[in-house]
Image: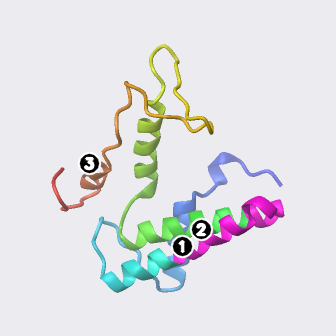
Amino acid sequence: MHHSPASHASPASYVREFHRAFGLDARTVPTEVSPELAAHRGELLAEEAAEVAEVSVEGPLDRLAHELADVVYVAYGTALVHGIDLDQVIAEIHRANMSKRGPDGHVARRADGKVLKGEHYRAPDVAEVLRRQGWRGEQG
């Protein structure tokens, strides 16, 4: 069944719905949380990443797709626990990644194919993105 883009919810909205339904933290301003909660979220994410590593070579592909989605879901949940609008952070990372290509279209690659930072690369300013979201953390 094909859904129109207008009816397509974002990962952030799905995870917000889940957190609200189950009484999990859902902050709206970037906030430091207790070391215990921060550690718990880190453990959840590490567990999901380990599942991806486990199935990435052997498969099957449906299991890999499931585990990748779980990583994204837990990552968005961790951002929500901290009050971070992850979509805005991803947009800033994307801007920085796209700046790896020079104006002439030249792309530097490592032997394994990883795209390297060229001379025109502009690093992401995630702190500035969080400050626009209301974060009062360390000034850059």
Task: Specify the amino acid type for callout 3.
Answer: Glu
Foreground of the two, 19 or 54: 54
Residue plotted at (45% across, 77% down):
41
Q: Which residue is mark 3?
A: 128
Foreground of the two, 98 or 56: 56
Hey, which quadrant is residue 118 in on the image? top left
- Residue 28 position in % (x across, y down): 34, 67
Real-space CA distance between mark 3 and mark 2, rounded to the nearest whole angstrom: 28 Å
Give the answer, above or below, for where 131 lies relative to 108: below
Dot 3, crowdedness within 10 Å: few (<14), some or many (≥20)?
Answer: some
Query: On residue 49, which mark appears?
Result: 2
Kindly report which numbered mark, 1 or 3, lies closer to the viewer in this rendering: 1
Q: Which residues are magenta?
A: 44-64
Q: Is residue 126 magenta?
A: no
Hey, which quadrant is residue 130 in on the image? bottom left
- Residue 42 position in % (x across, y down): 45, 75
